[in-house]
Image (cartoon, grey):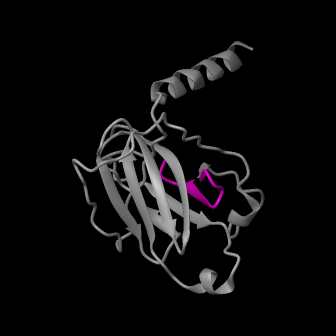
Amino acid sequence: MNSVRGVVLAAVVLLAGCSTADPPVTRAGTAPSTAAPSTAVAGAAASPPTGCASRVETGRLPEWADAGFSGEPRVPHVLGGQGEIVAILFGRPLTASRRDGANNKILWVAHPAATPSAATSPTTLTITATLHGTRTRVTREVAGGPGPSIVDLPQAGCWHLELRWSGHTDTMDLVYADS
């Protein structure tokens, strides 16, 4: 019972550290080698983010996102706010300026499109990431749309991601730790 209380207390402390009265913020980043360079806009007017709403799940992936996995896939993932995309986290924890040789690997899986033409036409997944409580904003692109990527962000913290692809949009918050 004490171990359960300890886990719950640790989760509350971690969530409290990212919570504020501002809008949510997440972090996302670059794509594989085809990623566009980041664009930092220092004085850009960004709506102030609210607390970090990122919640990394380790339960079963949504059924529409588990293709290619065997059994009952239980991998760390974050579901978008609209439920249109899931970020499957292979690089855990996500870390700013990795020095250990590992990568911030994220597999983006979008909910299947209703129209076949949208599902088959490749597009770019554009990620606009805003660092919580700041005007720091960077843009990353994943060529070909949702799929495998390496998403690096310039500093640790809670990042709010605005995701756009093939006429769809969604948002999520991701936390990047110090390296």
* Rendered residue at 53%/49% (across/down): 172
Residue 45 drawn at (x, y percent): 30, 48
Residue at 34% x, 60% y is 139
> Would residue 9 be found to the left or right of residue 18 on screen?
right
Counting from the top left corner in percent of width and height, residue 96 is at 34, 45
Please check the rendered image and state whether residue 88 is part of the magenta-colored stretch, yes or no. yes
Residue at 52% x, 54% y is 90
Q: Is residue 50 above or below residue 148?
A: above
**Residue placed farthest to the left in the image?**
42
Counting the numbered discs, the total is 0
Dividing the picture into quadrants, the one containing residue 121 is: bottom right
Judge whether residue 7 is colored magenta: no
Residue pushed farthest top? 2
Q: Quadrant of residue 108?
A: bottom right
- Quarter of the image with the N terminus is top right
Image location of residue 47, percent across then percent down: 39, 44
Main secondary structure of the magenta stretch: loop
Closer to the camera in the image, 165 or 21? 21
Residue at position x 63%, y 80% from top?
A: 119
Whole-percent x, y for residue 166 in the image = 53, 75
Q: Nearer the viewer, residue 104 or 109?
A: 109
Q: Which residues are magenta?
A: 79-93
Looking at the image, residue 161 sits to the left or right of residue 1; the answer is left
Residue 103 makes an appearance in the image: no
Left or right: 59 in relation to 143:
right
Q: The C terminus appears in which quarter of the rendering?
A: top left
Q: Is residue 33 above or below residue 91?
A: below
